Image: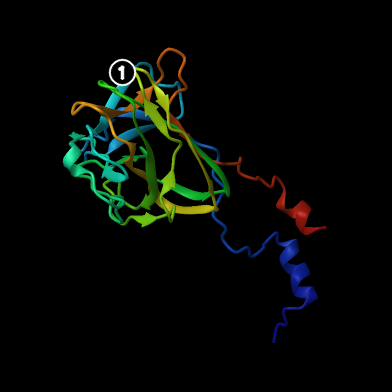
Amino acid sequence: MFAFRRPARRYWRKLGHVFVAPVPPPLAQKTYYFLNSPVNFSGNNFLALQDGGIPPSGSYDEGGWFVGTTAPTVYSLFYATAERLAGTFQGSTTLTANPDHTNGDCYVTPAPLSGTIPAGNWVFTMAVDANTAHGQAGHLQMRVFAATGQDGSGARLLSGSPLVTGSATLATAYVIYPTDLVWNAPAVTLANEYLLFQMEWVIETAGSDASDDVRFHIGSYLGSPMTSIVTPGTAPVRIANLRHYLRR
């Protein structure tokens, strides 16, 4: 019987064969830009992200909340299809375990990914503004999902507890206020999956007028940072000559 000892190892080296357990490839760093357009297929109202390239031009508001004089601390989920009314705020988080593509409560990547996003900081550069402002204040909370379908089907939660952005006090209408976030995440392995980003607004300070609102801001305006999500990443490791390493 053939014994798999040292001679056998030399035999396989000479043929240049090696058994290696499959390891998901490392993914390069990604920069996703928020857009004000849906992903454009029937019934899916998730908003689109642009994968790298030239940053989109312009400055837009997309979705948001009429906060009015609603007292804190209350929560309302983001919908792409409408600016949420004050009556939608609730006493506990509205982030869900199942993304809702009908109302469009997420941003979603344009293509699925396969491989491993290494552990490290995900940097969210985000902002809000208001059409009517009287000092209403709050912050965003987020969940990050991976899903086999761009409509959120087969979703699994990646982020655990809600991710909390910095606070913003909207003192003046049409001024951009940052609500940034850094998520120190473990390694994330994706198998032909999309990334989805769900968010809600949390009221910290009530407005003084029923028309006071908060709008999710997209793009860059008068020098404000471009709204985006940047993942950790690395270039794939390539071994040019496997035999060289086997001979060591």
Q: How is the image coloured?
A: rainbow
Mark 1: amino acid: Ala
For the N terminus, the image quarter is bottom right
Residue sitting at x 61%, y 44%: 236
Residue sitting at x 59%, y 64%: 21
Q: Please name the residue that numbered disc 1 is placed on.
A: 173
Q: Residue furthest top?
A: 222
Q: Nearer the viewer, residue 177 or 74?
A: 74
**Residue 94 placement (x, y as % from top left):** 28, 50
Write down the quadrant of residue 137 in the picture: top left
| Residues packed near mark 1 inside 10 Å, few (<14), some (14 to 19) or many (20 plus) | some
Q: Nearer the viewer, residue 184 or 75?
A: 75
**Residue 157 placement (x, y as % from top left):** 39, 55
Relative horizontal placement of residue 172, taking residue 227 as reference (left or right)? left
Q: Nearer the viewer, residue 167 or 40?
A: 167
Total residue callouts: 1
Report helix, strand or loop for mark 1: loop
For the C terminus, the image quarter is bottom right
Q: Residue furthest right?
A: 248
**Residue 121 placement (x, y as % from top left):** 56, 42
